[in-house]
């Protein structure tokens, strides 16, 4: 696991999840084999964990002081929390939404606005 400057989020970070470590290693190998076409590591962070019958997944950067909108049913263990900083979607935390969460990873990478993310989630604009 390495610390690096993430160009999308504009900050230095170190993430201790195997997904990031595998992606960093693969990119380091590609860059070493073809330095003329080397690229910076800028994948949107992702992690998951299975808790008994629930699957928890997170993409992007989620912080306690973000503006957050929850879509779905917390009582039914099937929900999605969208995180906003300014006008941008910066993270999503989901419980039992495996088919949806990776779409939000792509939206974060593309610089999606929070309004676009809410519309995509079916939550309307708030």
Image (spheres, rainbow, N blue to C red):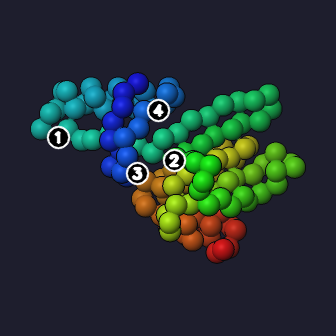
Whole-percent x, y for residue 1 in the image: 40, 24
Residue furthest to the bottom in view is: 125
Identify the residue at image location x=64%, y=75%. Answer: 125
Distance of label 1 from label 2 (alpha carbons) = 26 Å
Question: Of marks 3 and 2, which one's residue comes earlier in the chain?
Answer: 3
Disc 4 target residue: 15
Q: Is residue 90 left or right of residue 98?
A: left
Looking at this view, is 22 or 1 the one in front?
1
Is the C terminus in the top left, top right, bottom left or bottom right quadrant? bottom right
Q: Would residue 92 be visible to someone looking at this image?
A: no
Rounded to the nearest angstrom, the CA distance separating label 3 from label 1 is 23 Å
Q: Residue 20's spot in the image, x, y percent?
A: 45, 32
| Sequence-earlier tag: 4 or 1 | 4
Q: Is residue 105 left or right of residue 109?
A: right
- Which residue ends up furthest to the left in the rendered image? 36
Determine which of the numbered discs, if any, sits on residue 9 in the image: 3
Seen as rendered, the residue at the extreme right is: 75
Q: Secondary structure at mark 3?
A: loop
Q: Residues within 10 Å of mark 4 (few under 14, many from 20)?
A: some
């Amino acid at each position: 696991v390495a610390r690096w400057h993430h160009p999308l989020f504009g900050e230095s970070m170190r993430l201790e999840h195997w997904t990031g470590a595998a992606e960093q290693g693969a990119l380091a190998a590609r860059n070493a084999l073809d330095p003329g076409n080397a690229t910076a590591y800028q994948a949107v962070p992702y992690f998951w964990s299975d808790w008994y019958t629930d699957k928890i997944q997170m993409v992007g950067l989620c912080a306690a002081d973000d503006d957050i909108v929850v879509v779905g049913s917390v009582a039914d263990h099937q929900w999605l929390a969208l995180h906003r900083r300014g006008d941008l979607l910066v993270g999503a935390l989901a419980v039992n939404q495996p088919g949806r969460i990776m779409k939000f990873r792509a939206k974060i990478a593309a610089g999606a606005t929070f309004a676009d993310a809410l519309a995509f989630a079916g939550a309307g604009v708030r």
